[in-house]
Amino acid sequence: MISQTTEYALRAIVFLADTPSVAHTAESIANGTKVPVGYLAKIMQGLAKAGLVTSQRGLYGGFTLVGPPKDLTVYAVVQAIDPIRRITECPLGLEGHGPNLCPLHRGLDNAMLAVETAFKKLTIQHLLTQPQSTRPLCAFPRHEE
């Protein structure tokens, strides 16, 4: 459903959201999320370009979230990395279909709409605070406020 790159980006965002006031290096995020550091560095550049994280160089540098986790949705992260592709016209280019999708493509588009809607409602904060027996990426420590 989502690409491995998107999964890695979501792991990184959840990691950063767990300690929102602390800047983390790509290496520390990679260690905490079990993502290869070289791959993660490229993902973090994409997240920064999309305006979801900031990066600062230097001794106390690293990555931080731009805004609070309660304002960041899973949808925003997905769209920054590998956007959900809706079907707005016949993918086969059949004459007469145009925006009138056949049952197959209408069904697929409806499924993508449902995923999009769910991702828009799901915030990163919700991932960290919903009652459960395990936490996302349970290997890293939880930041207590």
Image: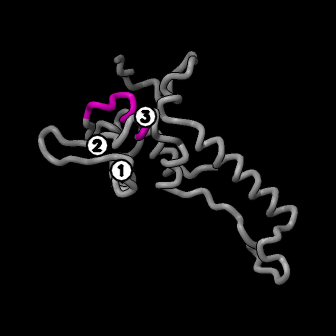
Magenta residues span 13-22
Q: Position of residue 106 (x, y in %)?
A: 81, 61
Q: Amino acid at mark 3?
A: Pro
Q: Choose top left, top right, bottom left or bottom right for residue 58.
A: top left
- The residue tagged 1 is 44
Which residue corresponds to the image point at 28% horizontal and 31% vertical from the top-left?
21
Task: Let me know if residue 21 is in the magenta part.
Answer: yes
What is the three-letter code of the residue carrying label 1?
Answer: Met
> First in sequence: mark 3 or mark 2?
2
Q: How is the image coloured?
A: one colour
Q: Residue at x 38, y 48 (%)?
A: 52
Residue 3, x across and y down, in percent: 56, 52
Secondary structure state at the residue bearing disc 3:
helix
Which residue corresponds to mark 2? 63
Q: Residues within 10 Å of mark 3 (few under 14, many from 20)?
A: many
- Specify the label residue 113 is tagged with: none
Q: How many numbered marks appear? A: 3
133 above or below 85?
A: above
Residue 34 forms part of the magenta stretch: no
